[in-house]
Image (cartoon, rainbow, N blue to C red):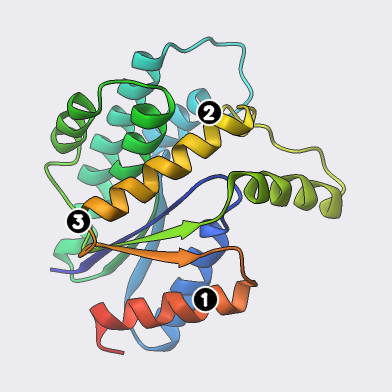
């Protein structure tokens, strides 16, 4: 079996940049890996992503949002993640079940025990071998999003979650840190407030724990 590593964090934590750099590092080391993410990763997931994240006139209740994320994950696990792991590949995944607990459980206030059960069903009880949590204050994370928009000369994407108030993102960050405290053997908390290269070095060290590189 391969190795399953998830990258988690609030908006603006830099996890998407770090997952790309991690893939480059592993390939340079001769390790076969793929990068995927949620929502998305499959044709069905891409359609669900448009509903869940992009600007839309559709109003989603908290439960509807939760179930759509679960549907996305079920297809993603079946179609992408498990087949890759069975081939012995390292799977780097941008968000997984912990994101659902953090965002829909802590953030939206839905029943966390039910969410855990739903995630287990959708993922076939798949648990990451390691979860890298990129920790940064909510204020700093959102400031990064705005700064990126100014530097690129484009308007902020303002997806469904980036539009939420600061307090929402603070609650999610606290939720993530609680999850890390509950499962210290799986989580590696990384200070994401530092520069990209410093964070990447930490990522490489942690990946080395799993790959022996």
- Of the image marks 3 and 1, the number of the one nearer the N terminus: 3
Which is more foreground, mark 1 or mark 2?
A: 1
SS at badge 3: helix
SS at badge 1: helix
Q: How many marks?
A: 3
Disc sitting over residue 8 in the figure:
none
Relative to 172, say whether 48 is above or below: above
The answer for how far apart the CA atoms under marks 1 and 2 are is: 30 Å
Relative to 130, say whether 177 is above or below: above
The answer for how far apart the CA atoms under marks 3 and 2 are is: 25 Å
For the C terminus, the quadrant is: bottom left
Give residue 97's quadrant in the image: top left
Residue at which label 3 appears? 83
Residue displayed at 76% across by 45% down? 146
Q: Position of residue 55 (x, y in %)?
A: 64, 24
Residue at which label 1 appears? 200
Residue displayed at 20% across by 43% down? 78
Residue at which label 2 appears? 50
Q: Position of residue 108 (x, y in %)?
A: 42, 23
For the N terminus, the quadrant is: bottom left
Which is more foreground, mark 3 or mark 2?
A: 2
Q: Residues within 10 Å of mark 2 (few under 14, many from 20)?
A: some
Q: Nearer the viewer, residue 22 or 9?
A: 9
Q: Residues within 10 Å of mark 3 (few under 14, many from 20)?
A: some
Residue displayed at 18% across by 71% down? 88
């Amino acid at each position: 079996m391969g190795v399953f590593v998830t990258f988690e964090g609030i908006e603006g934590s830099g996890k998407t940049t770090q997952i790309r750099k991690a893939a480059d590092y592993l390939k340079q080391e001769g390790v076969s890996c793929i990068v995927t993410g949620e929502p998305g990763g499959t044709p069905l997931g891409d359609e669900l992503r448009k509903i869940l994240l992009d600007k839309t006139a559709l109003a989603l209740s908290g439960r509807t949002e939760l179930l759509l994320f679960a549907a996305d994950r079920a297809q993603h696990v079946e179609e992408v993640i498990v087949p890759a792991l069975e081939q012995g590949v390292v799977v780097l995944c941008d968000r997984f079940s912990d994101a659902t607990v953090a965002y829909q459980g802590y953030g939206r206030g839905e029943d966390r025990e039910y969410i855990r059960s739903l995630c287990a069903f959708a993922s076939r009880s798949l648990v990451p071998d390691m979860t890298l949590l990129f920790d940064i204050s909510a204020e700093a994370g959102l400031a990064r999003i705005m700064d990126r928009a100014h530097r690129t000369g484009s308007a902020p994407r303002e997806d469904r979650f980036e539009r939420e108030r600061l307090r929402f993102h603070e609650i999610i960050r606290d939720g993530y840190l609680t999850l890390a405290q509950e499962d210290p053997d799986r989580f590696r908390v990384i200070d994401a407030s530092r520069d990209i290269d410093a964070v990447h070095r930490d990522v490489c060290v942690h990946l080395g724990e799993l790959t022996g590189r």
